[in-house]
Amino acid sequence: MVPADQGGGVMRIDVLTETVPGLDEALAAVDAFDATLVGGLLRPQPVQTAGLTELVHAVAGTPLAARVAEAAEKAAAGAASEDHLVVLAAARTALLGSAHDALTARIQEATGRPGGDGSVPEPEGAQAANVRAAARSWLSDLARSGWQGIDHDLVSGAAQIVSAMLPDPALRRLATLLDGFAAELAASCPGAMMERFPVRRWADLWSRGMLLTLPGAGGAPAAGTATGRLLPLGVDLQEHATAVQAQVHAVFEPADGTTARLVRASVSVPKPDTVVGAGLWQLLRPHMSLLAAVSEGRSMDLTGMPVTAEGDLLWNDAQAHAGEPADAFATARVALPTAADPVVAPLDRHPARVAVPVFLEGYAAATDDGEVTFTAAGQTLAVDTDRVPAAGPLTPEAVAASGACIALLRWDDGAYRVQPLAVETTVRKKAVTVHAGEWAGGTTDKNGAKAEKAATDAVAVLRERAGRLLRK
């Protein structure tokens, strides 16, 4: 982890340990506003008025200043309309967006990579004003009641709105958010009985939902096409009790010779809670051939693959074919340093969404009380081994013994952290590479094969039971 201009595409971590000007102040203003949503805005108390005032001060001197000041004044008097609440949500989102931009600018300085050019086009999609208005009304009622005032009657109001939205593809993004948000709130009812609240998370969901009710905000993103070579770097696997997602991070080299750029390809599927570990790949694999290429260490040749301005490939197996062998660490050393980072849509600018592929080597790995760190040139970077999935051979122990690492650089709990995707390490005096997605396309590993068989048996039983129910 030496300066990028010394070659090898490695990263400077000294830049990441420096204070980001204005970041703490912006996040403090967000926290102050979020606290107002705990007690609700129907009858605000002095402490809530102070939180609203802090939000106003944070956006002073910006184009939002006058409208936010008016909205905060009305909210402090318990008279905020839906439009006023939308303005407050926009101010909060703008502050988090500025924090995101400051954090990613620091990452670009650390990696030396170019930023993405241009802006994100407006999403496309039909507008359904009535159902959007209903969603905005429900979210406004939540803000007035506050998290302490939620009950089942209030939360259940989302069900009919979600049902009306789901048939329209342009509204499914908002419908999914409302459905998940309502489920979390319902599991916490009544709010008056709760001692602690997920304040930042619920405020994130609330403000994002409010803005998605605006015309044009929740449609499908505009997409172009990608033709060229895709060089996988690694797989980020995210598991929930009822769903799993695999997101492949890669460098895309256009066939026309223009600048290479970072892209992502994702696949998500529902899952039974009995399928865990390496068995997850069995659910994901049939939906995206790219997983097999990752497992085999191959590139893929794309022809007319849809891709958004944000670098998300809308994967279609018919437009991808297996290419030549491509070692992920060779890609990280040679292609990653000059690949442009994708642009980020305004609503997606949030510190929690920072996940940038980086390459690290020349560090000293250490473990202290279960926490792994990488240290180079007197600077230490925390390693988030909790994000390493159990569905692959990569382990915290392998990370702690590594000398080079492909990772996602994230920002969490006030500091940058790296999430390992693959490492170079030594096993029995032999240099080896270990990838989190190594079993994505199948495995002969004893533990992985055992988990795969267990998943096969579980899925077969569930399919047989489902078929029996459908025949009745």
Image (tube, helix red, strand yellow):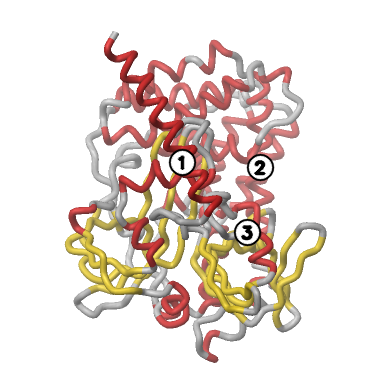
Q: Whole-percent x and y of residue 224?
A: 22, 59
> x, y (%) of residue 287?
31, 46
User: Residue at label 1?
Assistant: 453
Disc on res. 219: none
Quick check: 281 left or right of 4? Answer: left
Amino acid type, callout 2: Thr
Helix, strand or loop at mark 2? helix
Q: Earlier in the sequence, mark 1 or mark 2?
A: 2
Location of residue 146 with respect to 469 vertically, above or below:
below
Q: Earlier in the sequence, mark 3 or mark 1?
A: 3
200 sits to left or right of 327: right
Asked if marks 2 and 3 touch (Cβ < 8 Å), the reply is no
Vertical comparison of 47 with 401: above or below: above
Residue at numbered disc 3:
395
* Residue 123 appears left or right of 70: left
Residue at (72, 67) in percent of width and height: 373
Determine the secondary structure under disc 3: loop
Residue picked out by circle 2: 53
Mark 1: which secondary structure? helix
Mark before the other along the chain sequence, 2 or 3: 2
Specify few, some or many for label 1: CA neighbours under 10 Å numbering under 14, 14-19, or 20 or more: some
